[in-house]
Image (cartoon, helix red, strand yellow):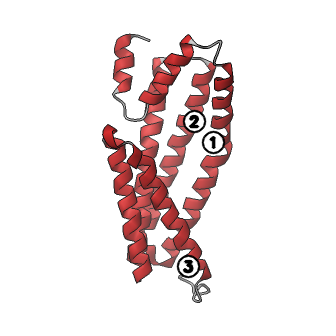
Amino acid sequence: MSWKSAAALHEMPMASGLCELCHAMAYRAARDRCLVAALDRANTVDLYGFIWTYGAFLLCFLLAIGRGGGGTAAYLGIVALVAGLGLDVLETATQLRLTGELPGTPSALQALAIGSTGKYIALSLVTLCAGVAMVARGGICGTLAGIACIAGSVAAFAGLVLPSHRGLLTTGTAVGWLVMLVYAVVSLLRPGRARPDAVV
């Protein structure tokens, strides 16, 4: 890969870290076999386990809140979720391919950048839609939880587009998902959980 291609790749929001790792590992391949094996195992667990676990959680939450008064926002969130899962599979499968053919081809690194960036955009939209759906459902707790989710989505998107605030990407996503989890548990345990509009 030319220096021009490498420089262009570094401008992509989510790919520069792995790009640097790929080049470092290309020059230290003999010493880094254990690291490659660890990356392979982590990506395999991600591809066959974690992606579908968080996907199932978000899907169940959006379906339940959509049925409980969340309206169109919940179903738009499902569309964004499907896109995010597909892009996450692309990202993780590409990482598995890269560890098998370091330092990787320009096309593989491009696919990685598309998958990684697109995944975070889609998942921030999922969090945004979940927040809007909670606000639409009403109630003080729902409104506060929805606002927190929307704030998490905005923070995640800011982390995506602003390299100097990259930490907001994972923090915002984590806040949104944690709020969804707490909201679902509280909805399950509250006295009115048997009503048709209960979240879970």
Type of amino acid under label 1: Asp
Mark number for residue 92? 2
Q: Residues within 10 Å of mark 2 (few under 14, many from 20)?
A: many
Q: Which residue appears at 39% of the width and 18% of the height?
A: 6
For the residue labelled by badge 2, is the local secondary structure a helix, a strand or a loop?
A: helix
Q: Which dot, 3 or 2, sits closer to the camera?
A: 3
Q: Dividing the image into 4 quarters, which one contains the N terminus?
A: top left
Residue 129 lies in quadrant: bottom left
**What residue sits 35% from the left and 61% below the top?**
151
Q: Amino acid at mark 2?
A: Thr
Q: Earlier in the sequence, mark 3 or mark 2?
A: 2
Q: Quadrant of the C terminus?
A: bottom right
Q: Is residue 85 above or below residue 1?
A: below
Give coordinates of residue 136: x percent, y percent.
Answer: 38, 76
What is the distance, in whole Å, between disc 3 and disc 2 at their CAs? 34 Å
Q: Of the residues under marks 1 and 3, which one precedes in the sequence?
A: 1
Image spot of residue 57 (x, y percent): 59, 60
Q: Is residue 20 shown above or below 43?
A: above
Identify the element where label 1 is drawn.
helix
Numbered label attached to residue 25:
none
As measured in the structure, the alpha-carbon distance from the residue carrying label 1 to the one carrying label 3 is 29 Å
- Residue marked by disc 3: 187
Query: Looking at the image, do the residues carrying marks 1 and 2 touch, with CB atoms under 8 Å apart?
Result: yes
In the picture of the structure, the residue carrying the numbered disc 1 is 46
